[in-house]
Amino acid sequence: MRQSAILIRLAAIFLLLLAGTEIVLRQWVLTPSRQTFDPQLGFTYLGNQDILHTREGRARITLNSLGLNAPPLDTIHAAAQNRPTVLVLGDSYTEALQVPRETNFVSLAAQASGLNLVNAGRSGLGPLHYPEIFGQLRADIVPDALIICLTQGDIQDARRTPYRVVRTEGELAISGLSVTASANNRLRGHIEPLIHHSALATLIMRRAALVLGGWQWPWEDWPFFDTPEIRSPARRAGDDDVYSAIMFQLAALNSQIPTALLYIPTFRYAAGGVMIETAQSRRDRRAFETMAAELSLPLFQAGAAMRASYARDSFPLTGFDNATLGHGHLNERGHAAVAQTLAQAARAVADRP
């Protein structure tokens, strides 16, 4: 009996600690997860969520009903009555949760071009995912044209993305491609109800993702994840396989809607207004230049406008006072510079037949 009483007390103390931790986290640290699991894309934001971003910069943003950092659908549809609608796909640089919505490069380019630009950036996703995102959004947004924002790391991310290609028998050319969420995201997907209701569970999963995110898990093909036929061929394949997969996805989009590409380079900063493009950014830029030429896709480069901005005042275009200047995501100066090129790209692609 005495041993049972001790166990009951310990259990009660443990539950009180859990409850106290949950209350403290919700009050001062974070809320339960505001993301939902998608079998193809992994975790994306739920619609109509208020997001407070403080890790880089500080911005409070209300997502629309589609989970996009964009105006409500009624506003988008009203603007579409008298101007072309251009959907802008990209990664976290495009989603731009670090700055107020009105200062991100999609909003600024919309003002400069007079077009109805819709920000469909999604953090952590890349070119292999964009046909799936476009397919999910097309009926709601009804775009007239598409711009895909590309950044350093997109090709490396494609190597880590689980995907399956379909080839006609006896042919090397890809005839179909599908993506699936990573093994880590699929694991998180099985406990999605818990992280939706618990700030502590959300914190634990985020910390685990930071530590374990780069691991290659042996269970990726286990039937538990319902996708045993999906592998990550890019993990074992050469660059040609990855490039072919990206090109197939870009061509698939261009066959459905007028499409243009925009490359946003990554720089290191030096004194005297000098910017040096990183070696990885140069490699990725040249790869996308080759792909665009082979696909006859227009490719716009934001590098010149970014260099001109830094030459004027020697203030880095990435980083924030509460993080590290010169590293990380675009700050408001960076968004203003990229917006100049995006406005040009939007006007050009909107005029395509």
Image: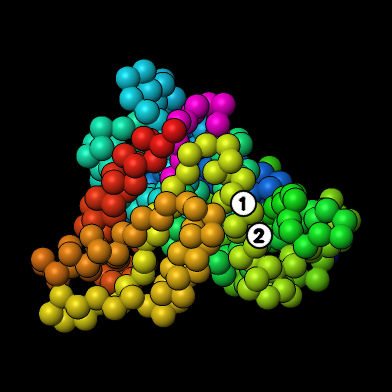
In the rendered image, the quadrant that contains the C terminus is top left
Disc 2, SS: helix
- Give the residue at mark 2: 245
Residue 111 image-quadrant placement = top left
Compare residues 89 and 11 and report the one nearer the observer. Answer: 89
Instruction: Residue at 57% x, 26% y: name it.
Output: 139
Compare residues 243 and 172 and report the one nearer the observer. Answer: 172
Q: Position of residue 162 (x, y in %)?
A: 71, 60
Compare residues 43 and 147 and report the one nearer the observer. Answer: 147
Residue 249: numbered disc = 1
How many C-alpha atoms fall within 10 Å of the one at disc 1: few (<14), some, or many (≥20)? many
Task: Name the kind of residue labelled 1 in the image.
Answer: Gln
How many C-alpha atoms fall within 10 Å of the one at disc 2: few (<14), some, or many (≥20)? many
Count of marks overlaid on the render: 2
Q: Position of residue 53 (x, y in %)?
A: 38, 51
Compare residues 339 and 197 and report the one nearer the observer. Answer: 339
Q: Position of residue 73 (x, y in %)?
A: 44, 25
Q: Position of residue 45 (x, y in %)?
A: 53, 43
**326 relative to 148, above or below:** below
Numbered range of the magenta stretch: 137-147
Label 2 to label 1: alpha-carbon separation: 6 Å
> From the viewer's perspective, is 153 left or right of 326?
right
In the rendered image, the quadrant that contains the N terminus is bottom right
Instruction: Residue at 31% x, 39% y: name it.
Output: 347
Instruction: Residue at 34% x, 31% y: name it.
Output: 116
**75 relative to 246, above or below:** above
Task: Name the kind of residue labelled 2 in the image.
Answer: Ala
Check contact, mark 2 vs mark 1: CB within 8 A. Answer: yes
**43 relative to 216, above or below:** above
Disc 1, SS: helix
> From the viewer's perspective, is 131 left or right of 218?
left
Instruction: Residue at 29% x, 78% y: name it.
Output: 276
